[in-house]
Amino acid sequence: MIIGFVIGESKPTSISAQTSRPLAVGEYIIIDSEENRLLGLVEKTIVSSAALTDVHNYDEAVESKEIADINSRDKSFTTKIMILGSLSSLKKGVVVIPAIPPFPGTPILEASKKDLESVFNPSNSSWSKIGTLLRNPQIELKININKIVTRHFGILAMTGMGKSNLVAIIAKEIAKLNGTLIIFDYHNDYDNLNIKKMNVMDAKINPRLLDANTLADVLEIRENADVQQRILRLALTQNVKESKEFWDELYKQVEFVGANPERKEDRHSADRVCDKIDDARHRFADILDPDIIDPISLIKEFRINILNISEFSEKQANVVLAYYLQELLTDKKLSTITKNSKNKRKKYRFNSPVFVIIEEAHVFIPKFEDTHAKYWASKIAREGRKFGLGIGIVSQRPRNIDSNVLSQIGSFAIMKIIQEDDQRQIAYAVESISKDLISQLTSLNVGDAVLVGQCVNLPTLIHIDEAKEKIIGSDPNAVEEWKKMMLFNNTTMDSRELVNKDLLL
């Protein structure tokens, strides 16, 4: 059915149209060009009234409204439409933009369910459903899992807009495909995820495997504490690393270095390092394990692996993440090289693709600071595709994430974002998102997202499914919880009063 016509100046990538009804931003339409039928996405809609234009007072507004109500030609619906490509080509997964733009007067049609399903709901096994089209909820929306694993994926949104829900959906779909996923869980959000093939564990550090600078971060020795840093560096000898009782030997060696009669001023600093060692070995006994041979071996292939790093301080979590990322990249490189060589006898930890998701990415991959984790995340973003190692970053502060890493991400799910600095960072990093779509980010509801990049055929506004498998993570109902606690407390008090009366009697 014809719902409008192309007007004004047309371009190969965008047109303006007058329509018979207001079209919603995110709605798909067909441009019935003589050359080819084109699929378009509504980016902007303007509703105007001739009678109610240039109204200067209330009485004039009342009179103008009466005129507008009886004049069927009064309302004007002007729409800006992004041309997504030839419909016949899009059905094959190929984007072909017309060389000649549609002529003014070209009809605008409603997109049929069949047309939209052929583009957004491919039957290929690489595609998995994560939601529905925002303006066409009867159309399922699938993403290409291959593309997020090999070309990387970013989830950006304000707190409470559905980031962890989308991570849970992706985890569920990867589990169905017998894939290997690793989630670095910074806030203990996923340990209760109700998905088969789950492997939940506490991330661990073997301090023997660290150099002195990295161990200083784990022990939380300040960067500007130069004397303490030097003492630890001198104390961490190869003999200490190979000793049976690592912490005891390190402690003794620090005391020995601090007892140097030629540097009496080192005594106090050595005592501070000993305090740090003693504190770390007891407070973090569960996660600093000098006897674990290979922390990476705890991760299981073909499973959804949840690595809990919530017990670590920020610096310690950074060290953990860097260590795991380094080992994963090294292992994937070697396994890929072996797979392509004649000598295939040696087995590595992971012989199939691995996808890693980093929560709170702005903490570990900061824009204005060099961290261990940032170095290895950047390296995976650049090189991981060749070795079957993908990275997913999740953050509510895009403006604080390193721009070089963001620029390597092939696909994004962008939910509600209000801060202008965040919007500018997104516009810089995501070439396929227009200013008009970015302007819509402030009006998205919980679970709504703009999906762009290689994991979808086209830029898409979607509503993400709710992950029933995710038991926790939604906002608490404070009012209901207070009410329940008050009832409980009142009941408890009444019971105590009865008991006291009985005792008095």
Image (tube, rainbow, N blue to C red):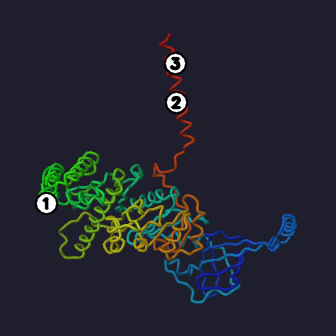
Query: Is 491 left or right of 309, judged from the image as shown?
Result: right
**Which of the two labelled residues, at mark 2 and mark 1, occupies the earlier sequence position?**
1
Which residue in the structure is indicated by mark 3?
498
Mark 2 and mark 1: Cα distance apart in space: 59 Å
Amino acid at dot 1: Gln
Would you identify the image quadrant in which residue 450 lies?
bottom right
Q: Earlier in the sequence, mark 3 or mark 2?
A: 2
Q: Amino acid at mark 2?
A: Asn
Q: Where's the N terminus, which quadrant?
A: bottom right
Q: What element does badge 1 sit on?
A: helix
Q: Residue 360, located in which quarter of the rendered image? A: bottom left
- Residue 276 in view (yes/no): yes
Q: CA distance from mark 1 to mark 3?
A: 69 Å
How far apart are the alpha carbons under marks 3 and 2? 14 Å
Q: Nearer the viewer, residue 120 or 209?
A: 209
Asked whether the beta carbons under mark 3 and mark 2 sit within 8 Å of each other, the answer is no
Observer able to see residue 125: no
Label ID, residue 238: 1
The residue positioned 23% from the left and 59% from the top of the image is: 227
User: In this image, 112 relative to 118: left or right?
Assistant: right
- Compare residues 248 and 361 and report the one nearer the observer: 248
- The location of residue 454, given as percent across then percent down, is 46, 74
Label 2 element class? helix
In this rendering, is residue 256 above or below 178? Answer: above
Residue 54: where, in percent of width, then height? 80, 73
Which badge, 1 or 3, comes first in the chain's sequence?
1
- Classify residue 222 as left or right of residue 103: left
Residue pointed to by mark 2: 489
Q: Secondary structure at mark 3?
A: helix
